[in-house]
Amino acid sequence: MAILACVAPSLTQTARAADSPADETGTLATIIVTAERRAESIQSVPISVTAITADTLAKFDIVQFDDYAHMVPNLSFGTGNTFGITNGREITIRGISGTNTTSYYINDTPLPISIDPRAINLERVEVLRGPQGTLFGSSAMGGTVRLITRQPDLARSFGSADVQGYVIHDGGLGYMVSANYNLPVIDNQLALLLSGYSTYSPGVFTGQYGIATLAMGPGGPWPTPTVPASQPRQTVKHLGNDVEAGATLSLTYRPAALDALTITPMIMHQDQSNNGFALADYTTQNLTQVRPLNNREGDTDIWTFANLTIKYAAPFGNFIDSSTYFHRYSHDTEDGSELISIGGYGGPPIGGTCVAAGVYCPSPSPNWVNSNQFTEELRFESSFPGPVQIVAGAYYNKLRQFIVSAEVLPYDAAGNPGFTENIPRVNEEAAGFLSATYNIFNTVELSAGVRQSHLEFQNAYIANGWINGGPSNSPSPAVKGQPRRDSPPNTNSMSRI
């Protein structure tokens, strides 16, 4: 069993709030964060935290990840080596990079790091720098990004609406419309908070099709195929636009007979699509995408987040149960025609789709990711009198995911697709954690934590097509530990502390 311990002098802590608002006296308002899974002032948190408040989000018109990420010290992001554009984002904190080194949360639920909830109903964004494994799991080696949503107000009605319009050179008119409204249904017992938005960001790229491009590669230049007569020269403007819409509904119920109990269900839905990738060819200043064939690229990303949180405030601490179901469907289509046509996979087959050698062969490359995830966490946050406090809990997560990728065309002479692959997986994790703090005196705090996890993976790789050399089925071998006796041979089982 491994135990992590540290002494953190609060006089030298590096927690900060981005543009903290001032109160009526002119002093900076107190920023409350939950970096240690308990509500406390950012000034007393003994870890490096950046908190971007709702006031700052509104003031600087921050609506998505790219807007607030640049405000956080030691945080960088980019596109990684994953399936499609919609699933490609990676986040690095303090230079700790690699697979699953930064966790991404909405409230108490870990989610794919590539989703980008619109920041119209957020209380704050918290970025925790440094290892957070005890409270946030093994995927938080570098740190954790948390989006904390606003909760319904039981006492008052309020709302707001925002309409923005703008014109982008070579793009055209864009807009964003958003609104939110808080309504107490039963005074001090039941309230709902509803928010929604719709946005259109115009595309600035121009596609030129029907042009034979010169493909360079090892041993190149390669012979340039000719454009088939069926593909005329044409120009399509405004590629790379972005269309998004979403809504969030939250309820808070606090029964009068038991006001220590708070029940908060929430559902969040977001739908995004575009008519082409906003990616430049070769240089960032180039806004023209030249392609031999009009195999239109683009992506769609649809996800739903449904959560139920139950909190009971006892005199000695809070008991919190959070249950979440998350579903995501994303679809990307890229154009692989140039790679296929110059023999990137050993040369396209003659016949079927490609009727002759030396002619550009259409080859759209679609990718689908379909995920269903259930997460449950039960924890206790103490409020004992005296210097000792604890956070203890149990965690469970199950992910079912299908990743399908294809080079659908060109078919071979027998009519078989060029390439298809399916990567079904089931990941399951159960964990228990305990974190204890001892406040020696006002400026020094001693903390220690432990987390034990049991993980099981079921993975397979199924592929077919002439690019793959025929059908194949390759279950993943065990990486660590031994499969359970009642598990199929492609199941990996391990425990971590």
Image (cartoon, rainbow, N blue to C red):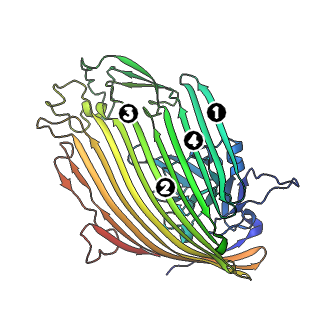
Name the spot of residue 290 as percent of width and height, x first. Answer: 39, 24
Helix, strand or loop status at disc 1? strand
Q: Which residue is mark 1?
A: 164
Sequence-first disc among 2 and 3 = 3
Mark 4 or mark 1, which has the lower sequence index? 1
Q: Residue furthest left?
A: 414
Give the distance between the C-alpha atoms of the residues marked 4 and 2, in whole angstroms. 16 Å
Residue at the image point whose x is 16% and y is 25% from the top: 356
- Check the image and report above or below for 12 versus 435: above
Name the mark on residue 297. 3
Q: CA distance from mark 3 to mark 1?
A: 28 Å
Where's residue 287, x and y in %?
49, 26
Q: Is residue 60 left or right of residue 249?
A: right
Query: Can you tell which quarter of the image residue 151 is in?
Result: bottom right
Query: Is there a contact, CB below 8 Å, between mark 1 and mark 2?
Result: no
Q: Amino acid at mark 1?
A: Gln
Could you tell me the amino acid type at mark 3? Glu
Label 1, label 2: how many angstroms apart (C-alpha)? 27 Å
**Along the line of sight, the residue nearer the viewer: 27 or 134:** 27
Residue 455 falls in image quadrant: bottom left
As drawn, the label of residue 197 is 4
Which label is found at residue 172? none
Question: Helix, strand, or loop for circle 2?
Answer: strand
**Secondary structure beneath label 3:** loop
Please tell me how crowded label 2 is: few (under 14), some (14-19), or many (20+) other residues with Cα within 10 Å.
some
Going by the numbered disc 4, the residue's amino acid type is: Tyr
How many marks on residues?
Answer: 4
- Amino acid, disc 2: Phe
Q: Is residue 62 left or right of residue 203?
A: right
Q: Do the CB atoms of the residues marked 4 and 1 lie less than 8 Å apart?
A: no
Query: How far apart are the alpha carbons under marks 2 and 3?
Result: 27 Å
Which residue is labeled 2 in the image?
Answer: 305
